[in-house]
C-alpha cells in the first residue's frame, strides 16, 4: 500500500510541477500586422488584440513574447506546426481551421465589407452631365447650327425685316440671339420673317427646335445614366465587372470564389492597400473593422466603405490542436466580459458598441 501511495504522490507532484511550469514558461504568441487589431506603433506592439492579450496574460500569470509574421498564412503555419503557443489578430473562426487547430471562444464579432475608391463614388448629377465631353460636343454643334441658321435668316431678311437690317460684322450675335429665342420661346411676334422663303425657313427652324431640345435632354439623361452605372458600388451584385481585390486565402477570397466574382489576390494587407491606393483595383472586399480603420486614418484620401456588413463572422484566438491553454483562456475571456474589462478594451479601439 505504501509503494502505491508514494507512486500516487509522485504523480501528483509531477502533474503540479508541470502545471506550474506551463504557466511560468514564456509563451510564444504569433500575430500579423492588421490595424487596429495588431500593429506596431512607436516601436511597440499595439491594437485591440494586443491589449486583450496583455489582460489575459495578467490574469493567467503568463509571460509571453510576440512573433510578428509577415503574412497571415505564415502566422497560421507557426501555430499549426507547434512553433507558437497561440496566435491572435483578426483570425476568423472557420470549420476548416478548426479541423487542424483549436479556437478560443469568440473575441470579436465581425464581417466583410466593401471599400470603393473615392473617384468611383461620385454620384451622378446635373453638373457632372453638363461638364461631360459628350454634352460639350452637343452644345458646340447646337451653337454652330444656331449661328448658321441665324445668319442664313439675316441673309434672307436683311432687306425686308428691320431687325436684320445691319452690317455683317454686327449681324452675327443678333441673328444668333433670334435663332436661340426661336428655339426656346418660339420667336418674336414683331420679328416675324416677311419674305416667303424666310417664312418657310422660319417654320423649318421652329420644327427643328423640337429636335434640338430633345437632343439636349437625351444627352443629359444618357450621361447621368452612364455615370450611375459605372460609378456606383452599393452591393455585392455591383462587383461583377469591377476590378476587385482581397487577400489570398482569406474568408473574403472564399466568399468571392463562391459568388464567382473575379478578383486579384494579394499576399498581405500592405500589398492590397498599395494596389488600391495606386488605382490597380477599384474595390476591396475584406474584414469590415480593418477597412473602417483604414478609411478613417490614412486611407481617407483614397476610399470609403460602402454598403452594410455581410457574411458575419467571429474572430478567435487559435492554439495548436489539443493545447492545454484553451480552457484557461476561455474562462478568463468569460471573466473579462462579465466584469466589463472587455468593453473597456473594445471602446478604446472602436468606440461604444451599438
Image (cartoon, helix red, strand yellow):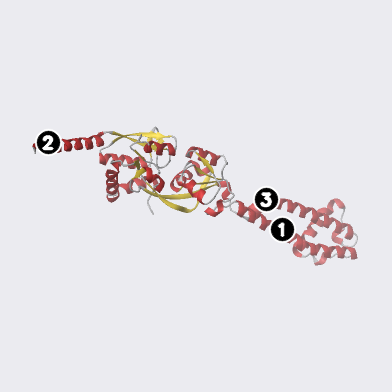
Q: CA distance from mark 2 to mark 3?
A: 92 Å
| Label 2: element kind | helix
Crowd tier of the residue under label 1, counting other residues whose Cα lies within 10 Å: few below 14, some 14–19, many 20 or above: some
Q: CA distance from mark 2 to mark 1?
A: 101 Å
**Could you tell me residue 112's position as x and y percent?**
46, 49
Residue 164 position by quadrant: bottom right
Q: Is residue 305 visible?
A: no
- Asked if residue 168 lies left or right of residue 183, the reply is right
Of the residues tagged 2 and 1, which is closer to the observer? Answer: 2
Q: Which mark is residue 6?
A: 2
Taking the view exactly as shown, the residue that stands out farthest to the bottom is 189
Residue 179 lies, with reference to residue 101, above or below; the image says below
* Of 232 and 122, the residue lying toward us: 232
First in residue order: circle 2 vs circle 1: 2
Name the residue that disc number 3 marks: 132
Name the residue that disc number 1 marks: 216
Crowd tier of the residue under label 2, counting other residues whose Cα lies within 10 Å: few below 14, some 14–19, many 20 or above: few
First in residue order: circle 2 vs circle 3: 2
Tag 2 and tag 1, C-beta contact below 8 Å? no
Amino acid at each position: 500500500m505504501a509503494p502505491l501511495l508514494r507512486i500516487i504522490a509522485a504523480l501528483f507532484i509531477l502533474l503540479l510541477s508541470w502545471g506550474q511550469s506551463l504557466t511560468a514558461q514564456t509563451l510564444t504568441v504569433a500575430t500579423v500586422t492588421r490595424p487596429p487589431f495588431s500593429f506596431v506603433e512607436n516601436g511597440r506592439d499595439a491594437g485591440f488584440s494586443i491589449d486583450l492579450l496583455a489582460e489575459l496574460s495578467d490574469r493567467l500569470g503568463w509571460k509571453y513574447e510576440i512573433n510578428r509574421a509577415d503574412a497571415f498564412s505564415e502566422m497560421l503555419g507557426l501555430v499549426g506546426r507547434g512553433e507558437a503557443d497561440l496566435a491572435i489578430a483578426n483570425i476568423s473562426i472557420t470549420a476548416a481551421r478548426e479541423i487542424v487547430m483549436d479556437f478560443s471562444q469568440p473575441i470579436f464579432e465581425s464581417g466583410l465589407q466593401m471599400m470603393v475608391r473615392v473617384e468611383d463614388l461620385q454620384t451622378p448629377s446635373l453638373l457632372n452631365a453638363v461638364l461631360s465631353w459628350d454634352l460639350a460636343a452637343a452644345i458646340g454643334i447646337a451653337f454652330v447650327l444656331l449661328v448658321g441658321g441665324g445668319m442664313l435668316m439675316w441673309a434672307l431678311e436683311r432687306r425686308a425685316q428691320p431687325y436684320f437690317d445691319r452690317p455683317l460684322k454686327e449681324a452675327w450675335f443678333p441673328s444668333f440671339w433670334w435663332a436661340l429665342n426661336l428655339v426656346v420661346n418660339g420667336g418674336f411676334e414683331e420679328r416675324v420673317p416677311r419674305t416667303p422663303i424666310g417664312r418657310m425657313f422660319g417654320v423649318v427652324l421652329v420644327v427643328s427646335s423640337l429636335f434640338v431640345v430633345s437632343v439636349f435632354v437625351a444627352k443629359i439623361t444618357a450621361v447621368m445614366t452612364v455615370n450611375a452605372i459605372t460609378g456606383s458600388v452599393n452591393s455585392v451584385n455591383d462587383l461583377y465587372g469591377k476590378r476587385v481585390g482581397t487577400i489570398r486565402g482569406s474568408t473574403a477570397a472564399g466568399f468571392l470564389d463562391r459568388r464567382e466574382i473575379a478578383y486579384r489576390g494579394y499576399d498581405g494587407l500592405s500589398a492590397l492597400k498599395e494596389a488600391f491606393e495606386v488605382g490597380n483595383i477599384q474595390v476591396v472586399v475584406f474584414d469590415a473593422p480593418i477597412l473602417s480603420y483604414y478609411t478613417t486614418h490614412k486611407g481617407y484620401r483614397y476610399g470609403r466603405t460602402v454598403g452594410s456588413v455581410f457574411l458575419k463572422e467571429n474572430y478567435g484566438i487559435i492554439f495548436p490542436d489539443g493545447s492545454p491553454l484553451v480552457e484557461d483562456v476561455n474562462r478568463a475571456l468569460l471573466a473579462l466580459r462579465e466584469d466589463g474589462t472587455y468593453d473597456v478594451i473594445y471602446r478604446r479601439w472602436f468606440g461604444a458598441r451599438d
